[in-house]
C-alpha cells in the first residue's frame, strides 16, 4: 500500500479519534472532568490499552468500541500491517478503507462473518 495513502488514513483515524473525544467531552460531564486533569498531549492516547476503569465507565460502550477500533488501526499502521485483512491476509481495497478507515476484514471475509452471525 502506498505510503501517501497510509499517511492520509493515519491522519483520518487521528481526526476521528479526536472527534469522538471532543463529542464525549461535550456530552459527558464525568468524561470531561477526567480529561480536564490530563495533559492535552495525552488526550489522544485516551483509548489505549491502559485506559482506567473510571474512563471506561464514563465512555459509552459504542464510543469505546470505536475508539478501540481506531487505536487498533493506528497500531496496524505502525506495524506496517494496515490494509491487510486480519483473516485471509489479502489487501483491503482502498475504497473500503476510505469508507471505514478502521476496517479489519476485506469485503469477502466480512460478508462471510455476517452470514455466520445471522
Image (tube, rainbow, N blue to C red):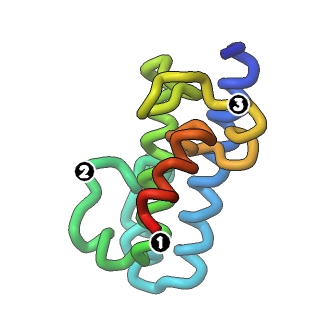
Q: Quadrant of the N terminus?
A: top right
Tell me if residue 48 comes above or below residue 77 in the rendering: below
Dots 1, 2 in contact, CB < 8 A: no
Percent coordinates x, y for residue 56 in the rendering: 31, 70
Viewer-nearest of discs 3 and 1: 3
Percent coordinates x, y for residue 54 in the rendering: 25, 73
Q: Earlier in the sequence, mark 3 or mark 2?
A: 2
User: Which residue is label 1 attached to?
Assistant: 62
Tell me if residue 60 comes above or below residue 89 in the rendering: below
Q: Residue 50's mark? A: 2
At a point 54% along the width and 64% down the height, the residue shown is 21
Viewer-nearest of discs 1 and 2: 1
Q: Residue 93's mark? A: 3
Tell me if residue 113 comes above or below residue 10 in the rendering: below
Quadrant in the picture for residue 60: bottom left
Q: What is the crowding at mark 1: few (fewer than 14 residues within 10 Å), some, or many (at least 20)?
A: few
At a point 60% along the width and 79% down the height, the residue shown is 26
At a point 28% along the width and 48% down the height, the residue shown is 49
93, 7: nearer the viewer: 93
Tell me if residue 22 comes above or below residue 48 in the rendering: below
Gap in angstroms between the C-alphas marked 3 and 1: 25 Å
Gap in angstroms between the C-alphas marked 1 and 2: 18 Å
Q: Earlier in the sequence, mark 3 or mark 1?
A: 1
At a point 71% along the width and 41% down the height, the residue shown is 96
115, 11: nearer the viewer: 115
Secondary structure under the numbered disc 3 in the rendered image: loop
Q: Earlier in the sequence, mark 1 or mark 2?
A: 2
Percent coordinates x, y for residue 67 in the rendering: 47, 56
Q: What is the crowding at mark 3: few (fewer than 14 residues within 10 Å), some, or many (at least 20)?
A: some
Q: Residue 76's mark? A: none
Percent coordinates x, y for residue 17 in the rendering: 57, 54
Amino acid at each position: 500500500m502506498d505510503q501517501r495513502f497510509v499517511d492520509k488514513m493515519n491522519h483520518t483515524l487521528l481526526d476521528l479519534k479526536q472527534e469522538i473525544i471532543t463529542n464525549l467531552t461535550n456530552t459527558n460531564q464525568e468524561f470531561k472532568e477526567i480529561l480536564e486533569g490530563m495533559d492535552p498531549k495525552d488526550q489522544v492516547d485516551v483509548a489505549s490499552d491502559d485506559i482506567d476503569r473510571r474512563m471506561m465507565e464514563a465512555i459509552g460502550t459504542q464510543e469505546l468500541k470505536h475508539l478501540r477500533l481506531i487505536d487498533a488501526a493506528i497500531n496496524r499502521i505502525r506495524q506496517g500491517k494496515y490494509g491487510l485483512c486480519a483473516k485471509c491476509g489479502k489487501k483491503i481495497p482502498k475504497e473500503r478503507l476510505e469508507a471505514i478507515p478502521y476496517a479489519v476484514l476485506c469485503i469477502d471475509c466480512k460478508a462471510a462473518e455476517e452470514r455466520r452471525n445471522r
